[in-house]
Image (cartoon, rainbow, N blue to C red):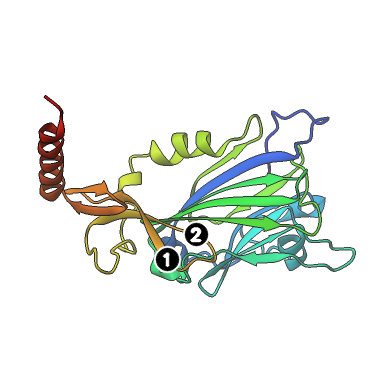
Amino acid sequence: MNDIGTNLSKNLEFSFYLTSLKFNVQEFLKSDYKANSNVIFVVSNDPKAGQYTLGDKIPESIVDYGIISIVNNDGILRVYSGSNIFSQKLNFHDLNFNNRSVKNFEVIYLSFMIDLHRNTVKFIMFADDLETSHVIHTSFLPGHIRSSTLFYTHPALKDVHLSIYNPRFYNDLTQNLYGSKNWNTFSATNICNLKGAENSCAKCIFKDGDMALTCKTCAKGYKFINGKCIPSFQYNQKWLDYNQENSKAKPK
């Protein structure tokens, strides 16, 4: 495991920070890397973690009781954060992608904010054409970020970012996701091909606890009107009819 960065002052610690990461799911599942094949990401303040290299198996105590760990649990992304090793209190949550296994996706992007003042970890998640969010309320403080903080990333991970100065979801997504040339390719699985509106929605939102999907961006050739994506030619005709009706209704 590697340290978080030597450019941080040894006297500083951060209680509010954001991390984001992107990985190709199929590349991750088919990876030849075996030492920690199901462990995607780990951040820890345990000094013992520094002795482990990429070829070593990371002990469960570091994965389970670190600041935050993300593990593939048979197709479910499980997050460990806010656990306490002294009381053996294990705190974990499973991220929900509309009850779909991550094995069915191509690319996943996770952006998460850890707030020690509120004991929360807030996730904004993108899986191909699906967007969702999740909030974890931890039992114990996840842990501060310091210059001695150690991290592990699976070899399949791409574009791992840490923001400790003025962390904001908007900044991260604008710089590292929406501004990426790969953003438009996040539509591989067609989850947003909603029943009754086939091929009309390009990207959709799933609210945790609500099974319904809501369209966020219409596909090419469609326009968003009255909560639905309709063909552009119908949209143009409705707009023309609307203008004609309003022009007739104007007083002379």
For image coordinates 53% across by 65% down, the residue present is: 96
Disc 1 marks which amino acid?
A: Ala
- Whether residue 1 is visible: no
Based on the displayed image, in which of its 4 quarters is residue 248 positioned? Answer: top left
Horizontal side, residue 188 vs residue 123: left or right: left
Marks 2/1: CA–CA distance? 8 Å
Residue, far top: 252
Q: Residue furthest bottom?
A: 74
How many marks can you see? 2
**Number of other residues with Cα within 10 Å of mark 1, as a class: few under 14, some 14 to 19, many 20 or more:** few
Q: Amino acid at mark 2?
A: Lys
Asked which secondary structure carries label 1, the reply is: loop
| C-beta proximity under 8 Å, tags 2 and 1 | yes
Q: What residue is at 32 percent from the left and 61 percent from the top?
A: 192
Q: Which mark is residue 207?
A: 2
Sequence order check: which comes first, mark 2 or mark 1? Answer: 2
Which residue is identified by label 1?
212
Q: Nearer the viewer, residue 6 or 51?
A: 6
Quadrant where the image shows the C terminus: top left
Q: Is residue 185 left or right of residue 213?
A: left
Q: Residue 220, image x and y in percent?
A: 20, 48
Instruction: Give above or below for 45 relative to 95.
Output: above
